[in-house]
């Protein structure tokens, strides 16, 4: 929606037909395709900006997906990648929950968690150069604050990236 409002052409991919259906309601001008991130149905070097927000951790072959993002990125293109952090401070509360498996705890069939260092290694191994890393801690303003939201607002300015909920990597394509 934001990108379309700025006059940019946008494209999207989702493994779920329901996800594509919802995206079409929100971004009717976008070129949306059902598919997987490990095999992107686009020509080489066509995108100035590639984003992968909350998806890479669900892909069975994350390294292959990063190679595909590199392939479709234009020379000098940018990648914005948001991934969950395995050392997220709030994850330690899971030690006190009753669940036999991570899947029972989260409801996710597959979710790859990584640390800041592990994320750097994976991304830079995929021919991207990391320019900077931002923290993502869900601190958006909402009409009704809960104790958890207030705690996030207070901790966010001092919480190091290695303990944040998510890691946002801003990268530039390294040409081969």
Image (cartoon, grey):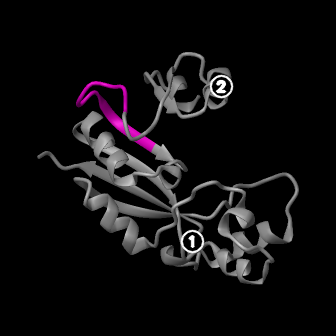
Q: Nearer the viewer, residue 17 or 2?
A: 17
User: In the drawing, what numbered circle is on residue 164?
Assistant: 1
Q: Is residue 40 left or right of residue 70?
A: right
Residue 157 counted in the magenta span: no
Percent of width and height locating residue 12:
49, 29
Relative to 8, say whether 77 is above or below: below
Give the class, few, some or many, for how many residues have Cα within 10 Å of label 2's Cα (few <14, many ≥20): few
Relative to 77, say whether 92 is above or below: below
Instruction: Farthest residue to the top: give it.
Output: 29
Relative to 126, say whether 104 is above or below: below
Distance between the Cα atoms at labels 2 and 1? 29 Å
User: In the drawing, what numbered circle is on residue 126?
Assistant: none
Percent of width and height locating residue 109:
63, 54
Percent of width and height locating residue 11:
46, 26
Q: Residue at x 60, y 32 (%)?
A: 16
Picture quarter with the N terminus: top right
Write down the residue under mark 2.
Answer: 26
Q: Residue at x 77, y 83 (%)?
A: 96
Whichever of callouts 2 and 1 sits on the residue coming sooner in the sequence is 2
Judging from the image, what secondary structure is the residue with disc 1 in?
A: loop
Range of the magenta residues? Answer: 40-51
């Amino acid at each position: 929606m934001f990108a379309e409002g700025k006059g940019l052409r946008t494209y999207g991919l989702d493994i779920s037909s329901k996800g594509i259906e919802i995206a079409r309601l929100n971004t009717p001008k976008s070129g949306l395709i059902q598919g997987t991130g490990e095999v992107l149905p686009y020509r080489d070097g066509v995108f100035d900006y590639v984003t992968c927000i909350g998806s890479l951790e669900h892909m069975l072959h994350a390294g292959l997906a990063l190679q595909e993002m590199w392939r479709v990125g234009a020379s000098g293109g940018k990648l914005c990648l948001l991934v969950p952090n395995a050392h997220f401070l709030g994850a330690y509360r899971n030690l006190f929950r009753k669940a036999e498996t991570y899947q029972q705890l989260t409801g996710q069939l597959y979710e790859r968690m990584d640390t800041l260092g592990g994320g750097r290694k994976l991304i830079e191994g995929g021919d991207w150069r990391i320019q900077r890393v931002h923290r993502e801690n869900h601190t958006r303003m909402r009409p009704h604050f809960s104790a958890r939201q207030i705690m996030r607002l207070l901790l966010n300015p001092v919480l190091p990236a290695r303990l944040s909920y998510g890691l946002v990597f801003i990268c530039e394509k390294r040409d081969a």
